[in-house]
Structure formats: C-alpha cells, structure tokens
C-alpha cells in the first residue's frame, strides 16, 4: 500500500531532511500522500431470497491528500455504500481500505474520529438553534465545552452563517441547512471530509454557495474532500473524479483528462429533412463513424468537429436540404460516461445483477 495522510510518515521526514542536508542528492518528485486508498474493496448485501446484491465490486481507488475528489455515478451505482465503507460505518465483504492513515477494518474507531461526514439526510434538530446544534454535535465528538464553543463559532463563520447562529434550524433555508451540516461535519477538524450528494434538492444559487465553501476549505485549509454526486457539473468542479457504475470503477482521472481521452467532438445538425439528411451525412462522413438521428437532429462524433461542419453543410445543400442549425461540441463528462458504459448517466438504471449468495459470499 501507499503511504497515507496521518501515517507517522518517516519516509516523508527523510525526504525533507535529505533535501536540506545533502546537496548532491538527486532530486526526487515529492512523495504522493494518499488520504484514501482502497484495493479490491467489495460489499455484498445478502437478500432474503438467497441472492446477493453486489453494491461495490472490487474498487481500487487512490485519493491524494488535499484533493477534491468526485465519485460520480447514476442512482444505485454504489456511491453511498462506498462512502459507508470508507467512513467505517459498514464492513467490507472483501478487500482493504486505508482512510486518513487508519485501516477501516483494523482501526474503524480511528477512521471515524479522523473523518467528517455529511449524509444525504439531515442530522440536525429543527427546534434547536444553529449554534445549539453544533454544540451538541461537538460534545458528541468529545470536544471539551470551551473548545466546542470556539469550533462552533469558527465553523459557523466558515460557512457564512455567523449572523444566523441564534436562528432555529427550522427557520433556515435548504441551502443554509446544508451549510450548517457542513459546519457540523467540520467541528472536529477532520482530515478527510465525506459528502454524500451534498447539494441534491438545492436550487442553483444554494448549490453554488455550498461549492464556494467547499473550495475555500480546499484552498485555505488543504482539506481532502470526497463528494458523491450524480451532477456532472459538480464533478467538473473537482480536481479529479472516479466514475462508478453497477459497483465497478469505470474511469478515473481529471475532468479534462477524461474528456480529452474521448477525443471526438459531437457534431449536431438540424435540417429541413432530417431523415434524408441522415443518409447524406452517412455517405459523406468516414464509413466507420456512427451517425444517429434523434429528437435533436442528426449527430455524429468526429475529431475536430468544427472542421466537418462546412463539409457536411455543403453536401446537404447540394442535395437541396436546408441546414437550420449546426454545432460542434467538445466531449462532456456524460460523453465520458457514455463511452465507458454505453449509456447516458441520466438513463434509468437496469436491474442490478444479482447472484446466489451461497455461491460466493465475496465475489466481486
Ligand atoms: N442495506 C442494503 N441492503 C441491500 N441492498 C442494498 C443496501 N444498501 C444499498 N443496497 C443496494 O446496493 C446498490 C447500491 O446502492 P447505493 O445506495 O450504494 O447506490 P448509490 O449510488 O448511492 O445510489 P443513490 O444515488 O440512489 O443513493 C443498489 O442496488 C441498492 O439497492
């Protein structure tokens, strides 16, 4: 396994010492410190009818310390289950994971102490004030009374709620409640913050505010942030992302890198006669390219899409077909998802494959 945030890291200390004392030493790249590292992580749920739902199937994941990392996948892909495993709230069926320097199987108590969590469902008491909610949670985390008060004040300021500290939670907007949850998750200064779909149900303005605070956390405090989401634009906000589908990791990288790997632009044409246009475009484009017709018109994927537009328009117009609109769009993260899974992230999920529990127990 790699070294982790929170290890007593003698290797890192050695590296720094070497750089200071040995001028002839060959410079080495800074050692990468992982806040989260998993190998072959599996979680199966036994069903009453003797089948097993494999929610997570052999996950290998590395998240660098200080990184904002998105875990992107459609409903039922296994995101919440992975989060529960990484926060040591559920035991893996197989595999291993180290989070904030502690092993989730060997030291689940340490993992829980070192991470902060924001669940999909609110853990706030609506009748207590923002401040009272934080005090209670700080005491539950084991913070002494004075320290609890101090951290409540600090975290309320961090999420922009200092002026609402005496407001009962039920009077706060949905966005403010999410930010208060964020403050709650930060009370004990966690090394890694996990957020399960933190902006689901929020309007775009409130969503942007939550992200503003997450970016502050990363930029000012170097926090490691792990966010599950099915919003493509949220994954775009992150330093890196992993795409999960049916419990398996299908791709991992930076948003730019993943999109660049797809390469091709999407060219879409709206014409006076899309059915006839489909045939002309098929004859004009290279033979191995798939040209499709849907509600948005005729489309195809080609490298350097904008260079193809004049060529296709000329071919269509020479056959008397008027082109009303033409566009070339670089790949999106949904295209990346499509490339790896054969469907859009917004397509309703097929029934997850199940297998007889007795046959495996831990089969990914
Ligand atoms: N406690 C459980 N018992 C049995 N099956 C479960 C349990 N929890 C989750 N599952 C199943 O495991 C699979 C993955 O679920 P999970 O909640 O991890 O997905 P998700 O990506 O977080 O979905 P969502 O975005 O809808 O929350 C699904 O098929 C789900 O029905």
Image: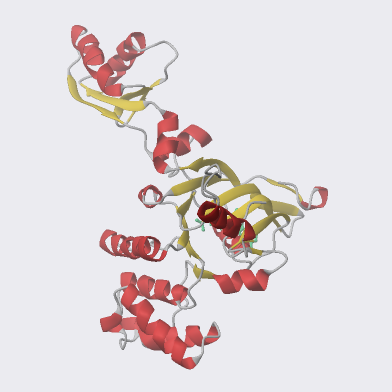
Q: Position of residue 361 (x, y in %)?
A: 78, 53
Name of the residue lying farthest toward the right: 358
The image shows residue 130, relative to residue 185, as above or below, that is below
Drawn side of residue 224 relative to residue 211, left or right: right
Residue under the point 48% across and 42% down: 253
Residue 272 makes an appearance in the image: yes
Residue under the point 46% across and 87% down: 147
Quadrant for residue 105, please give it: bottom right
Q: Position of residue 72 (x, y in %)?
A: 47, 49
220 or 60, which lies in front? Answer: 220
212 or 332, which lies in front? Answer: 212
Q: Position of residue 132 (x, y in %)?
A: 40, 89
Quadrant for residue 292, please give it: top left
Drawn side of residue 301 relative to residue 352, left or right: left
Residue 201 makes an appearance in the image: no
Q: Position of residue 294 (x, y in %)?
A: 34, 29
The image shows residue 244, relative to residue 322, as above or below, that is below
Residue under the point 32% across and 17% down: 278
Residue under the point 28% across and 16% down: 277
Drawn side of residue 159 relative to residue 1, left or right: left
236 or 325, which lies in front? Answer: 236
Drawn side of residue 196 relative to residue 277, left or right: right
User: Where on the image, by quarter, is ligand 1?
Assistant: bottom right
């Amino acid at each position: 396994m790699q070294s982790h945030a929170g290890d007593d890291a003698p290797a890192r200390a050695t590296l720094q010492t070497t750089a200071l004392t040995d001028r002839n030493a060959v410079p080495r790249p800074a050692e990468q410190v992982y806040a989260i590292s998993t190998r072959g992580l599996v979680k199966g749920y036994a069903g009453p009818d003797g089948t097993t739902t494999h929610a997570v199937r052999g996950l290998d994941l590395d998240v660098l310390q200080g990184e904002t990392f998105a875990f992107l996948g459609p409903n039922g892909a296994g995101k919440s289950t992975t989060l529960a495993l990484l926060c040591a709230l559920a035991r893996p069926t197989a595999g291993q994971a180290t989070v904030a320097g502690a092993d989730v199987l060997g030291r689940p108590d340490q993992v829980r102490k070192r991470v902060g969590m924001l669940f999909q469902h609110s853990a706030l008491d609506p009748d207590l004030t923002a401040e009272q909610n934080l005090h209670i949670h700080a005491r539950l985390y084991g913070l002494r009374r004075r320290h609890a008060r101090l951290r409540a004040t600090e975290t309320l300021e961090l999420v922009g709620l200092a002026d609402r500290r005496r407001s009962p939670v039920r009077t706060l907007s949905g966005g403010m409640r999410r930010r208060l949850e964020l403050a709650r998750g930060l009370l004990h200064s966690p090394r890694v913050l996990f957020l399960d779909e933190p902006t689901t149900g929020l309007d775009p303005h409130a969503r942007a505010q939550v992200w503003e605070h997450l970016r502050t956390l990363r930029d000012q405090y170097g926090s490691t942030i792990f966010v599950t989401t099915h919003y493509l634009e949220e994954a775009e906000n992150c330093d890196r992302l992993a795409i999960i589908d049916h419990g398996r990791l299908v791709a991992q990288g930076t948003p730019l890198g993943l999109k660049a790997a797809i390469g091709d632009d999407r060219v879409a044409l709206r014409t006076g006669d899309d059915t006839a246009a489909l045939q002309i475009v098929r004859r004009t484009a290279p033979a191995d390219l798939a040209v499709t017709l849907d509600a948005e018109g005729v489309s195809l994927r080609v490298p350097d899409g904008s260079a193809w537009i004049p060529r296709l328009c000329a071919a269509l117009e020479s056959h008397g077909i008027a082109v009303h609109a033409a566009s070339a769009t670089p790949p999106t993260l949904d295209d990346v998802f499509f490339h790896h899974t054969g469907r859009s992230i917004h397509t309703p999920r097929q029934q997850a494959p199940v297998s007889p529990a007795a046959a495996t127990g831990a089969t990914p």
